[in-house]
Amino acid sequence: MEEETVTLFRPTGPEELKLVEESGFRRWPPRLVGQPIFYPVTNREYAAEIARKWNVRDSGSGYVTRFRVRKAFMSRYKVQRVGASHHEEWWVPAEELEELNDNIVGTIEVIEAFEPTGYDRPG
């Protein structure tokens, strides 16, 4: 019998994505100083909005990732609405991120990528 999971999405920039890749796409890196929570979001639309508007501006590219976490683990967190009806996030305290990583089922997938508008690729 397959265990129940919850699908989470996370907007990320290239530096964080490189660390995820180094883990074999199985773990999120520890939070940086001043980042008390890890906030995966509930839907692709919201993740894409953040990746496109914030990650591209701040770091040159943005990515939407998707991953599954055991439902029993995620049930301890309430979904937080932080704006429009689709702006929903889980707030996982930074000190619980390793436990979240231990509850990821499968791998973290990159499902969408964004670059600055008007970007001219070499070659």
Image (cartoon, rainbow, N blue to C red):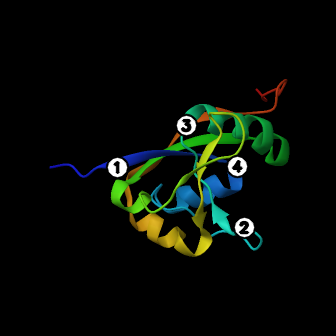
Residue that mark 4 sits on: 13
Nearer to the camera, 13 or 9: 9
Amino acid found under the numbered disc labelled 4: Gly
Q: Dot 2, crowdedness within 10 Å: few (<14), some or many (≥20)?
A: few
C-alpha distance separating marks 1 and 3: 15 Å
Residue at horizontal 62 percent and vertical 55 percent from the top: 39
Q: Dot 4, crowdedness within 10 Å: few (<14), some or many (≥20)?
A: many
Nearer to us of marks 4 and 1 is 1
Q: Which mark, residue 5? A: 1
Q: Which mark, residue 106? A: none
Amino acid found under the numbered disc labelled 2: Gln
Amino acid found under the numbered disc labelled 3: Asn
The x, y position of residue 8, in whole percent, is 49, 46
Q: Earlier in the sequence, mark 1 or mark 3?
A: 1
Quarter-of-image position of residue 93: bottom right
The x, y position of residue 21, in whole percent, is 54, 55
C-alpha distance separating marks 4 and 1: 25 Å
Amino acid found under the numbered disc labelled 1: Thr
Q: Which mark, residue 35? A: 2
Q: Which of marks 4 and 2 is nearer the N terminus?
A: 4
Residue at horizontal 70 percent and vertical 41 percent from the top: 62
Q: Is mark 3 on a helix, strand or loop?
A: loop
